[in-house]
Image (cartoon, grey):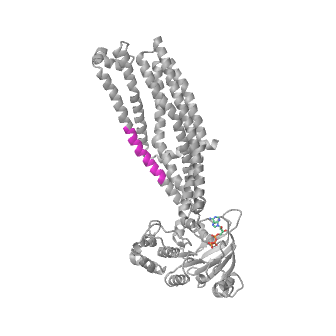
Amino acid sequence: MKNKKTQKQSNILRFYSFTKGFRAKFLISVLMVVVAVIANYMTPQVIRVTVDSVINDNPFNLPGFMSSWIDAIGGREMLRTHIVICAAISLFFAALSGLSNYASRMNLARACEGTVARIRDTLFDHIQHLPYAWHNTHQTGDIIQRCTQDVDLVRNFVSDQLMECIRTVLLIAVSLALMFSMNVELSLLVTAFLPVVIGISLGFYVVTGRRFRVADETEGELTALVQENLTGVRVVRAFGREKFEIDRFNQKNEYFTNLWVKLGKIMGVNWGLGDFMAGFQVLVIIVAGVFFVERGTLTEGEFLAFTAYNSMLVWPARNLGRLLGELSKTTISSTRLFDILDAEQERDCDAPVKPDMNGDIVFDHVNFGYSDSSEVLKDVSFTVKAGTTFGILGATGSGKSTLMYLLDRLYELPEGCGTITVGGVDIRRIDLAHLRSHIGIVLQEPFLFSKTFRESISDGAARHDEETVRHYARLAVIDDAIENFSQGYDTPIGERGVTISGGQKQRVAIARMLMQDTPIKVFDDSMSAVDMETDAKIRKSIQHNVHGTTILIAHRITTLMNADQIMVLDHGEVVQLGTHQELSQQEGIYKRIFDMQSGKSDPDFPQEVS
Ligand SMILES: Nc1ncnc2c1ncn2[C@@H]1O[C@H](COP(=O)(O)OP(=O)(O)OP(=O)(O)O)[C@@H](O)[C@H]1O
């Protein structure tokens, strides 16, 4: 409980830090609201004085300086003959209220949008630096919802509800002050209603708060479901899963709808009860007011002003419920935003180094598991000599990609679980950006942004000229295919462009990686979707034109057979290490697969390791 309270307080303080540079505007906005509220409340006072002391003969019940001013301009008689002055004063306060409201809104909009833009920038920046493991354990749809809808809720709160809260508290305070200055008994009667109205609001705040959180989380799940469905549209179509997906969506949507229907019902009761209380309060004040006027303890003008203030008070008091409801939603949204901002970013060690990355890569007694329960890599040791090609073969799930995740520090190798060094330097000591910018990786299912072929290949590279792009496209054996598109290298690909085949995608990704010209290049099963002939062409062109250390991960022996060293991984353990000549003669997994794939054993057997 204490923690929750501290968390809420710290959330408010943390939001405060985002307002730096905009605080003066927020302050002006609040001051303008104060002026607007006071100006607003002056009109009933003008009516009171006009009725009681200008039209009737009661003494002016006004502060000294105002009475002196009235005397100076000719007193009651002058005002009586020029009643338009009273109307003009009333108009002045109405105009002042309007102008102050305008100034408040303008300053608030600037301050609020600036603050929210800063929150958005901070979130995006933070997400860019969160570990790969964090992204793997969070649904994309949910993250998107937090960065859009939750930010919007916070923004609405700051731009509308926060100022509304300030205005409401001011309205209540000013109303009560003016009422008490006119008639204490009647004011006490009005005040007696306040705890009831505010109590009801608070009750609803408590009831709706928890439900809003569930509704918000469900909306996140719904967004995630739609996002997953759109990303996997090909699988949905290929497996005829449309009905299954529609049912799944309908089920979640129905649950979500029911949550909001229930919330709507609760809010309906809240509004109904609020309406009843407001009507009742107005009735009681009118009846009591008439009684006081009859008794002579309240003037007619005061009665008019009183009923005006009472009506002005009814709305803010009722509004408190809505504002508290919004506050509960905003608290939830802000917690969800800070959940992201609190996630720990990838960190370098205290004094990161930037060594030459052309050295040997050494895995020394590496043990690793994604969770405590299962170990994916078991005492893995091997050396990739600088400038050589190193092949890794292994069944699905044997831990090949995990080795590369560790090398690229997408997952950190914990202390005491062995070491990975490049040129003799432990990679945990290497500057993260330096490490990654020197290791190029092509994945089995590469991701291409929505760009043209030219932009995709030169993405992030130092040079972008046409000849260089073509050179790397030729190395990846994709040049001819690109030329076949009507717009050639300017053809847009990805979401809003043409759809290219899996093999073409892999080759564009290979060209992109080669163009980065990193000293270490990793091909993680990245030729699985190209035919064997193209695979051979790519390997040949890379072998003759590209320098540096190459790590080839594959299920096809032909992809690996020319490597200087080949390692066979089985259930996370190194079981064989040698050249193709050596391994193809040793009894073991490599020979068995080689025989299978070269057709020496059972021809009905699968042609790739799985
Ligand atoms: N992010 C992750 N979180 C938890 N477990 C994971 C994660 N990535 C992989 N694994 C598990 O680790 C094991 C090794 O996976 P890895 O991807 O390294 O295998 P692989 O040899 O590259 O397989 P493939 O040839 O199919 O790509 C598998 O059991 C897999 O389920």
Q: Which of 109 and 278 is in front in this view?
A: 278
Q: In which quarter of the image is the N terminus?
A: top right
Answer left or right for 484 relative to 267. left
In the rendered image, residue 182, in percent from the top left (x then y), is placed at 45, 19
Task: Please provide the residue range marked out in magenta.
Answer: 102-120
Q: Where is residue 456 in the image (x, y as percent from the top left)?
A: 45, 70
Residue toward you, 153 or 278: 278
The prevailing secondary structure element of the residues shown in magenta is: helix
Q: In this view, does 335 lie above or below 484?
A: above
* Residue 463 placement: quadrant: bottom left
Residue appearing at x 56%, y 57% in the figure:
224
Question: In the image, 122: left or right of 344?
Answer: left
Q: Position of 465 compared to 145: left or right?
A: left
Q: Position of residue 43 (x, y in %)?
A: 38, 26
**Residue 83 x, y percent position in the rendering:** 30, 20
Quadrant observed for ligand 1 in the rendered image: bottom right
Residue 566 visible (yes or no): yes
At x 46%, y 12%, the residue is: 294
Residue at 33% across, 28% down: 91
- The C terminus - image quarter: bottom right
Task: Let me know if residue 342 appears in the view.
Answer: no
Quarter of the image where one finds residue 403:
bottom right
Pick the front one: 599 or 427: 599
Reply above or below: 15 against 85: below
